[in-house]
Amino acid sequence: MRKFEKISFEQFKKDVKDDKELYESYSLPKRETKFAAGYDFYALYDYTLKPGEIMKIPTGIKVTMEEDDVLLLLDRSSMGFKYNVRMCNQVGVIDADYYNNNDNEGHMWIRIQNEGDKDYVVKKGDGMIQGMFIKYLKVDDEEKNFETRESDY
């Protein structure tokens, strides 16, 4: 099952703000049109990114998915094309085992940089990135003994 969820209010208080009204007001990602491949993620609050500035931004969202799915977090076209703003890692890769991890419940964050020459202004509820689910393949002769490792997040 693929499903977006809000992080718990306890995690929201740690990562964002102790504000129940803000927590209850934001929306889960959704596709804006029938043929859209990506799910739009919406800003939790207003922010302005000045030229040359880098900002880490919480989404308030976690995702559960099939074990052979990956969620790719991508810039919205207008971010780069119109404003020269992009995610610092270019593409965020969210694996199925990131969901409900011990560190942060699987809370997805983005880090963006303004490489343009004008302020990039985002209002609460504006689309800020998009997520796309992709099925992936594995090699047939893969070893099945995976080590447990701490999350890189």
Image (cartoon, rainbow, N blue to C red):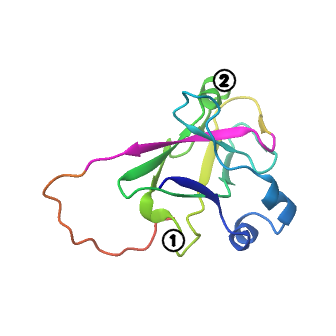
Residue situated in front as seen by the camera: 74 or 38? 38
**Alpha-carbon span between mark 2 and mark 1:** 36 Å
Q: Report the number of discs.
A: 2
Question: Local crowd at mark 1 within 10 Å, few (<14), some, or many (≥20)?
Answer: few
The residue to which callout 1 is attached is: 101
Residue 130 image point, x, y percent: 58, 40
Relative to 92, does residue 32 appear above or below in the rendering?
Answer: above
- Indicate left or right for 117 with 19 as reference: left
Residue 37 image point, x, y percent: 51, 33
The local secondary structure at tag 2 comes to: helix
Q: Magenta includes 135?
A: yes
The residue to which callout 2 is attached is: 82
Residue 65 image point, x, y percent: 46, 56
- Indicate left or right for 147 with 16 as reference: left
Which of pointers 2 and 1 indicates the residue nearer the eye? 1
The local secondary structure at tag 1 comes to: loop
Q: Magenta includes 127?
A: yes
Residue shown at 57%/42% (left/top)?
Answer: 87
Residue shown at 80%/50% (left/top)?
Answer: 45
Relative to 22, does residue 29 appear above or below in the rendering?
Answer: above
Q: Given the image, on which type of amino acid does mark 1 rest?
A: Asn
Residue shown at 41%/56% (left/top)?
Answer: 66
Of callouts 2 and 1, which one flags the residue occurring earlier in the amino acid sequence? 2
Residue situated in front as seen by the camera: 34 or 136? 34
Q: Which residues are magenta?
A: 123-137
Residue situated in front as seen by the camera: 83 or 130? 130
Residue shown at 76%/70% (left/top)?
Answer: 13
Q: Given the image, on which type of amino acid does mark 2 rest?
A: Lys
